[in-house]
Image (cartoon, grey):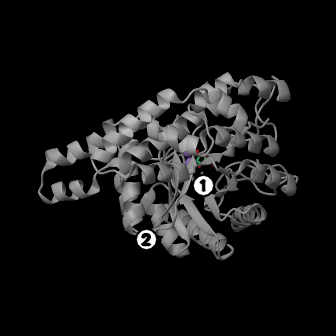
């Protein structure tokens, strides 16, 4: 199924209310010196990659409930991203996971991507599950395994993922490792780290010259005593050990409660080593909840640092913006629409922060004023700006309302059937 611009325009209906809301906000912001036109353009240009593994209903170890009409193959996943992009105009990329998404027909997949204006962002390897037909098991680790042959198998898998990504136009590989231990004494920390460093270097040196390596970290799960790449410091260290084109990837859910993620973002950007971002939200751990559903103010503060870094740290590369959220009780596409909107909202608010006044207040140690400046931006209802950015590209006034009024899920069920299970997580 593909949504046309005409269908979306008809779902948008009359734009009078939007015009009134936008003009009111634009006048107000212009009076305080904001260049509204360039702000709307920044929002319209901002594209986030959809993870292929979030397009089906998510699951927990307790079960998985189909949402019906789920994509059954890569082509259908690409169609779903096309629907998201047509509505939101901010999902112009996809992040694939191999082997779940190994293309059968590259030309067909690329054609769907082109038709929908979608590019291939970072591609993910998978050494946290055993794959049918593979010689060795990852039960006791992959890149950190004690056994050289198992490490070699994991390295080769990553190299194969890069070859697949090259055919699609990806330019970066993301690795997330489950390697770690569940009990004290199970493994030597130092040896596991040294093996991981060596394996990462082998993957890195085999990368094409225009590719980068993104190293994700996470404190626990599936191992509950130790994880080899447990935090940003370990990832940063490994990235440095690999080389200039290796970077840290921050996944918002991969921190212990109350970690100051915005400070991590600032530190990495100052060192030119923040390469990618996985957006989601969480209350307790790696909950993969809808972006902005639990801690929207924290997300705004993170965006404040991202915006600052994008302006002041030219040595930091363009970031790979990605979502890593999926849930088992929402329609996955509705969930992603909500996440995309929350990201845009936090970005827009961060762009509204009066940076000159903020640094002045900081120099004057005017703590109250510093807080006021941040909260002035945060309290602004920026939704008319998001609407304007979407409309400027032919998107929906309200993506969620259009998704429902155009009966997208009903149409997908008609096309694909009720009893569908998406491949992947
Ligand atoms: C596992 O924690 C995980 O959620 C990581 O965040 C990865 O990015 C994702 O799975 C896909 O491998
Ligand atoms: Mn992630
Ligand atoms: Mn995760």
Proximity of marks 2 and 1: CB atoms separated by less than 8 Å: no
Tell me the CA gap for discs 2 and 1.
29 Å
Q: Determine whether 172 is above or below 279 in the image.
A: below
Q: Is residue 182 left or right of residue 84?
A: left
* Label 2 CA crowd tier, 10 Å (few <14, some 14–19, many 20+): few
Residue 282 at x, y percent in the picture: 46, 36
Q: Determine whether 295 is above or below 179 in the image.
A: above
Q: Determine whether 283 is above or below 106 in the image.
A: above
| Residue 314: numbered disc | 2
Residue at the image position 40 percent from the left and 68 percent from the top: 313
Name the residue tied to disc 1: 177
Q: Quadrant of ligand 3?
A: top right
Dividing the picture into quadrants, the one containing residue 243 is bottom right
Q: Determine whether 47 is above or below 333 in the image.
A: below
Label 2 sits on a secondary structure element that is loop
Of residues 160 and 25, the one nearer the viewer is: 25
Which mark sits nearer the N-terminus, 2 or 1? 1
Q: Quadrant of the N terminus?
A: top right
């Amino acid at each position: 199924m593909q949504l046309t611009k005409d269908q979306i325009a008809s779902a948008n209906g009359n734009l009078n209310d939007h015009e009134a809301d936008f003009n009111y906000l634009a006048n107000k912001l212009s009076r305080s010196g904001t260049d509204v036109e360039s702000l709307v353009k920044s929002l319209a240009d901002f594209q986030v990659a959809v993870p292929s593994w979030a397009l089906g209903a998510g699951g927990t170890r307790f079960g998985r409930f189909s949402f019906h009409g789920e994509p059954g193959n890569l082509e259908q996943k690409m169609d779903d991203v096309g629907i998201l992009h047509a509505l939101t105009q901010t999902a112009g990329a996809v992040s694939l996971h191999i082997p779940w998404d190994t293309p059968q027909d590259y030309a067909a997949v690329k054609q769907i991507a082109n038709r929908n204006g979608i590019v291939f962002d970072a591609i993910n390897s998978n050494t946290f599950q055993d794959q049918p037909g593979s010689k060795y098991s990852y039960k006791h680790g992959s890149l950190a395994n004690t056994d050289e042959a198992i490490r070699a198998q994991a390295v080769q898998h990553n190299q194969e993922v890069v070859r697949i990504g090259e055919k699609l136009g990806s330019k970066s590989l993301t690795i997330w490792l489950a390697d770690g231990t569940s009990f004290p004494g199970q493994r030597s920390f130092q040896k596991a780290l040294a093996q991981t460093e060596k394996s990462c270097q082998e993957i890195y040196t085999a990368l094409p010259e225009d590719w980068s390596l993104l190293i994700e970290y996470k404190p626990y799960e599936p191992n509950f005593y130790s994880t080899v790449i447990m935090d940003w410091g370990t990832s940063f260290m490994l990235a440095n050990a690999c080389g200039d084109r290796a970077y840290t990837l921050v996944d918002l859910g991969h921190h212990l409660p109350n970690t100051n993620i915005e400070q991590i973002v600032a530190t990495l950007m100052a060192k030119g080593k923040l390469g990618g971002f996985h957006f989601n939200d969480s209350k307790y751990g790696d909950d993969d909840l809808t972006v902005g559903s639990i801690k929207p103010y924290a997300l705004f503060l993170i965006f404040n640092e991202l915006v600052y870094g994008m302006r002041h740290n030219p040595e930091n590369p363009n970031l790979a913006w990605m979502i890593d959220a999926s849930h088992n009780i929402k329609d996955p596409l509705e969930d992603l629409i909500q996440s995309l909107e929350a990201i845009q909202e936090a970005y827009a608010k961060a762009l509204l922060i009066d940076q000159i006044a903020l640094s002045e207040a900081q120099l004057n140690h005017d703590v109250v004023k510093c807080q006021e400046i941040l909260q002035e931006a945060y309290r602004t209802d920026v939704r008319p700006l998001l609407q304007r950015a979407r409309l400027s590209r032919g998107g929906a006034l309200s993506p969620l309302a259009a998704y429902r009024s155009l009966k997208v899920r009903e149409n997908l069920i008609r096309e694909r059937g009720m009893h569908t299970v998406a491949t992947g997580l």
